[in-house]
Amino acid sequence: MSIVLTVDATLHPLVLPARADAAGAGEFRELARVRNDVYRAITGRDEQDLEPEALLPLLRSRPERTTTVWAVRVAGEIVGRAVVDIPREEGSRTAIASIEIHPRVWGRGIGTAVLPHIEAAARQHGRTVIQNWTEQPASSGDRITARTGHGSVPDDHVSRFLLRHGFSLEQVYRVSRLDLDGPAAGRSAALHDDAVRAAVGYRVLQWEVPTPPEHLDGYAWLKSRMSTDAPSAGLEADEERWDAERVVAGEKRIVEMRQRLLVTVAQHLESGELAAFTEIGIGPDMTATTHQHDTLVLREHRGHRLGQLVKCASLATWRDLAPQSRAVVTYNAEENRPMLSINEAMGFEAIAYEGAWRKDLS
């Protein structure tokens, strides 16, 4: 059933197909194409492109998260989408929401008309906080500083929309890129050797998913600490419950998406505990940009350059696994100075910024 938004815009709840290539999956495939167009128009880059087969597993509900998707149409043509994720962690008060509409139809009041439906979905699930992460186009004009005091985003159409509707800029993520053909690409070898000297009592282990059974519990614990130990500023950060079963399910999605993921960990030799990890991966196009995903050092193991150790070891192995990929991108909170310092030393350069926004529902 479609919902009238404006004179020519409508909102359509999307029923996900069983498969992206199913006979009735045409609307979903068109939504996937428009999603990529929207990201390209906003960022000027294509590394967030996903084929329909890769997008579908990300939009399905799962035990730890309920997802609702709508298509936004203007005169019958899909021009964007709205997505609400409801985390199922115990005590969660948050809904993670996004409204992604092509810039060519901005300024018509469509986003403003969609927002009440987003808020209604959050309230239906008993949520009192909406959070949103949005990367914004580069701009040389005025900027808005995060409430942390670290980082800023352009004072542009996106920011004005969110501020006008009661959101506050809680945190800024730096989007950084490493050119693997550039002069900085060779720095990681020396940094790795330096980290090895500092990380006495630790060793590096690596695997491509699936995770070996003997490391599932340790890896799950590291993933759970990512939700509590990484900087979260004034955002609601639910403590995620990870176990071996959740890791296995997540890795099955990665395989379904036809992606490769390399996990690099530092293991404490005396206790056998996995103390730090990083993930790096790519989609089926091995010439595309590589994504550096989660990286974390457990608090009790910090001070041994383990972050530097796993990131440099990961990159060295990845260049053998995916030699045709010529760049790596990663996202880090601007107040996460230890991780940013490692990236900068490796040669990563800032290319964009992503705002993390919060709205408390009345």
Image (cartoon, rainbow, N blue to C red):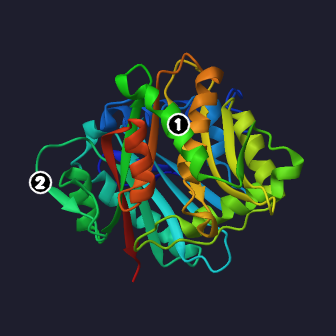
Q: Tell me residue 155's x, y (percent).
A: 17, 55
Of tags 2 and 1, which is closer to the observer? Answer: 1
Q: Residues within 10 Å of mark 1 (few under 14, many from 20)?
A: many
Q: Residue at x 88, y 51 (%)?
A: 214
Q: Tell me residue 139's x, y (percent).
A: 18, 43
* Residue farthest left in this picture: 141
- Left or right: where 203 falls relative to 11: right
Name the foreground residue: 13 vs 39: 39
- Left or right: where 334 falls relative to 273: left
- The kind of residue on which mark 1 rests is His
Tag of residue 291? 1
Above-or-below relation of 148 to 50: below
Name the foreground residue: 258 vs 182: 182
Q: Residue at x 23, y 66 (%)?
A: 164
Determine the CA span between mark 2 and mark 1. 30 Å
Q: Residue at x 52, y 43 (%)?
A: 194
Residue at image mark 2: 142
Tag of residue 361? none
Above-or-below relation of 185 to 297: above
* Residue 347 image-quadrant placement: top left
Q: Secondary structure at mark 1?
A: strand
* Residue 25 visible to the viewer: no
Above-or-below relation of 138 to 288: below
**Sequence order check: which comes first, mark 2 or mark 1?**
2
Q: Tell me residue 300's x, y (percent).
A: 63, 70
* Residue farthest right in this picture: 213
Specify the quadrant that holds the C terminus. Answer: bottom left
Q: Secondary structure at mark 2?
A: loop
- The kind of residue on which mark 2 rests is Asp
The number of discs equals 2
